[in-house]
Image (spheres, rainbow, N blue to C red):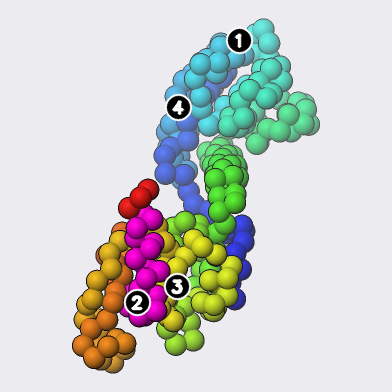
């Protein structure tokens, strides 16, 4: 069956907001050309947030502002672009560097500094677009990795379900599962937003998940925290008959967030009542 695991599938998508671009070059014409190329870029979208004329200004600006990528000239009066990147090591984790220069002599050193790209002037539009695409991809992957790490920390000790449903892999925190219900050869995993079909055994899930989930019927396992009401109701069963241990009605439990009712077997009624009382005490 699907194991309780901590693996996940990351889907790469384009950034929802434009890349924030800082241009650093002592030549006004070079800055103007880069600004025009950035504004013309349709995918990924990008916008120039500042234009600066030397490395010292850039270092000061980055001390109190942020951007996604710096289009950085190498040779400028005062500290050069390579020195600027050296000074930023360990302080600008999210900032990608794309060197833009008339000279190719510094390319090896630039890539030693983990530059995303090294463009030679005059910069061609397609080369800049390729660089920005690389920046967007790297930025997304880094943030996705950070998000996964944070999720793992938040879920440590809680666990997740990894469920393959209709060819897609879903990573569901156990705390988000409202109930599991057995139907024919499959199980339905219900959250507030999803119904997922999985292969497995309620008995095995009950043993794995422990006291956090309550068996309310031979075909249903409910998150104790999601139990809201217990009453006798008429519940339709498969084929339109009455799902019931008695002649006309059966006990049922209302599940939080989705307001769905699940049948409760007679011998589990007291356990459901106890779960409700515990929630009331909290």
Q: Nearer the viewer, residue 275 or 160?
A: 275
x, y percent for residue 194: 39, 65
User: What secondary structure predominates along the stretch shown in magenta?
Assistant: helix
Contact, mark 3 vs mark 4 (Cβ under 8 Å): no
Residue carrying label 3: 215
Label 4 Cα neighbours within 10 Å, binned few <14 / some 14-19 / many ≥20: many
Write down the region rendered in magenta: 262-279
Q: Is residue 274 found inside the magenta-colored segment of the image? A: yes
x, y percent for residue 87: 69, 17
Please identify, in this view, whether the residue under mark 3 or under mark 4 is nearer the observer.
3
- Camera sees residue 164: no
Quadrant housing the N terminus: bottom right
Q: Nearer the viewer, residue 222 or 140?
A: 222
Residue carrying label 1: 56
Residue 48, label in figure: 4
Please identify, in this view, whether the residue under mark 2 or under mark 1 is nearer the observer.
2
Residue carrying label 2: 264
Ranked by sequence position, the earlier of labels 1 and 3 is: 1
Instruction: State the residue at coordinates (57%, 57%).
Output: 159
Ranked by sequence position, the earlier of labels 4 and 1 is: 4
Q: Quadrant of residue 99?
A: top right
Please identify, in this view, whether the residue under mark 1 or under mark 3 is nearer the observer.
3
How many angstroms separate mark 2 from mark 3 (CA)?
9 Å
How many angstroms separate mark 3 from mark 4 (CA)?
58 Å
Element marked by disc 1: helix
Ranked by sequence position, the earlier of labels 4 and 2 is: 4
Instruction: State the residue at coordinates (48%, 48%).
Output: 14
Ranked by sequence position, the earlier of labels 2 and 3 is: 3
Q: Nearer the viewer, residue 19 or 152?
A: 152
């Amino acid at each position: 069956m699907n194991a309780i695991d901590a693996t996940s599938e990351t889907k790469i998508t384009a950034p929802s907001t434009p890349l924030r671009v800082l241009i650093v070059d002592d030549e006004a014409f070079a800055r103007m050309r880069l600004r025009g190329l950035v504004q013309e870029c349709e995918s990924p979208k990008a916008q120039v947030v500042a234009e600066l004329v030397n490395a010292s200004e850039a270092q000061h600006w980055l001390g109190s502002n942020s951007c996604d990528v710096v289009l950085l000239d190498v040779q400028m009066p005062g500290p050069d672009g390579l020195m600027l990147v050296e000074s930023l090591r360990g302080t600008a984790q999210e900032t990608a560097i794309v060197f833009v220069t008339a000279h190719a002599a510094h390319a090896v050193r630039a890539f030693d500094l983990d530059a995303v790209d090294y463009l030679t002037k005059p910069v061609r539009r397609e080369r800049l677009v390729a660089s920005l695409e690389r920046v967007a991809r790297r930025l997304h992957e880094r943030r996705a990795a950070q998000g996964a790490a944070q999720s793992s920390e938040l879920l440590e000790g809680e666990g997740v379900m990894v469920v393959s449903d209709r060819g897609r892999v879903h990573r569901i925190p156990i705390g988000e599962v409202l109930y599991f219900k057995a139907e024919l050869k499959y199980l339905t995993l219900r959250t507030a937003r999803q119904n997922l079909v999985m292969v497995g055994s309620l008995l095995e899930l009950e043993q794995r998940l422990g006291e956090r989930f309550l068996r309310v019927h031979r075909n249903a396992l409910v998150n104790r925290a999601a139990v809201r009401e217990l009453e006798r109701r008429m519940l339709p069963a498969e084929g339109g008959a009455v799902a019931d241990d008695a002649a006309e009605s059966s006990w049922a439990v209302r599940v939080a967030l989705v307001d769905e009712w699940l049948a409760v077997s007679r011998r589990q009624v007291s356990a459901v009542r106890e779960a409700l009382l515990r929630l009331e005490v909290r």
